């Protein structure tokens, strides 16, 4: 799977979790948030350690990469704040809603602007190699993430 297909697959997983949040009672949202958090932490990790550094090598992609990194920073801040809130906090639902809106915006920018630019600058072979590297890192990060969550 090439790097862009891998990232889009991650985007789809998170979007499904967002749809579940919208379709369920608030009492189920904390558990769904934990799944969203795990997916986003793994996804941002592989983007920031492998994908973004590689594509930032292309001068024309530098600005959009820097914006993506800032959006990740904001999302991580929300993830930390949401994790720290008590389940019955009145701030949980509005903060979760804003996180979801921010992520949807970020995904639209990546898929609508960044990914087409990446496909112009990198050939399929490079994207496949990048995808394989990201998949391997994703599996390693998942193992350490799961171990640290216990």
Image (cartoon, grey):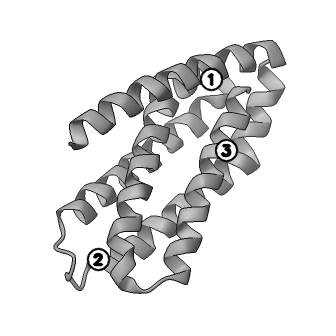
Give the residue number, with chain letter if any, for mark 1: 55
Image location of residue 66, percent across then percent down:
50, 36
**SS category of the residue bearing label 2:** helix
Q: Are marks 1 and 2 in contact (CB under 8 Å)?
A: no
- In the image, which is nearer the foreground, mark 1 or mark 2? 2
Give the residue number, with chain letter if any, for mark 3: 9
State the separation of the CA atoms marked 3 and 1.
19 Å
Viewer-proximal residue, 136 or 128? 136
The crowding category of the residue bearing disc 2, from other C-alpha atoms within 10 Å (few below 14, some 14 to 19, many at least 20), is some
Q: Which mark is residue 92?
A: 2
**SS category of the residue bearing label 3:** helix
Answer with mark 3 or mark 1, whichever residue precedes in sequence.
3
Report if residue 57 is visible in the image.
Answer: no
Answer with mark 1 or mark 2, whichever residue precedes in sequence.
1
- The N terminus sits in image quarter: top right
- The C terminus sits in image quarter: top left
The crowding category of the residue bearing disc 3, from other C-alpha atoms within 10 Å (few below 14, some 14 to 19, many at least 20), is few
């Amino acid at each position: 799977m090439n790097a862009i297909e891998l990232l889009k697959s991650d985007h789809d997983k998170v979007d499904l979790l967002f749809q579940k949040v919208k379709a369920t009672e608030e009492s189920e949202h904390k558990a769904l948030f934990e799944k969203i958090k795990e997916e986003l932490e793994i996804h941002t990790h592989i983007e920031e350690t492998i994908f973004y550094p590689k594509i930032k090598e292309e001068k024309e992609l530098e600005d959009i990469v820097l914006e993506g990194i800032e959006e990740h920073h904001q999302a991580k801040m929300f993830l930390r704040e949401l994790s720290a809130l008590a389940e019955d906090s009145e701030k949980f639902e509005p903060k979760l809603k804003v996180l979801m809106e921010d992520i949807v915006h970020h995904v639209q920018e990546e898929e609508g602007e960044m990914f087409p630019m990446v496909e112009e600058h990198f050939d399929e072979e490079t994207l496949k190699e990048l995808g394989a590297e990201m998949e391997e890192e994703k599996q390693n990060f998942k193992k350490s993430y799961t171990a640290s969550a216990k």
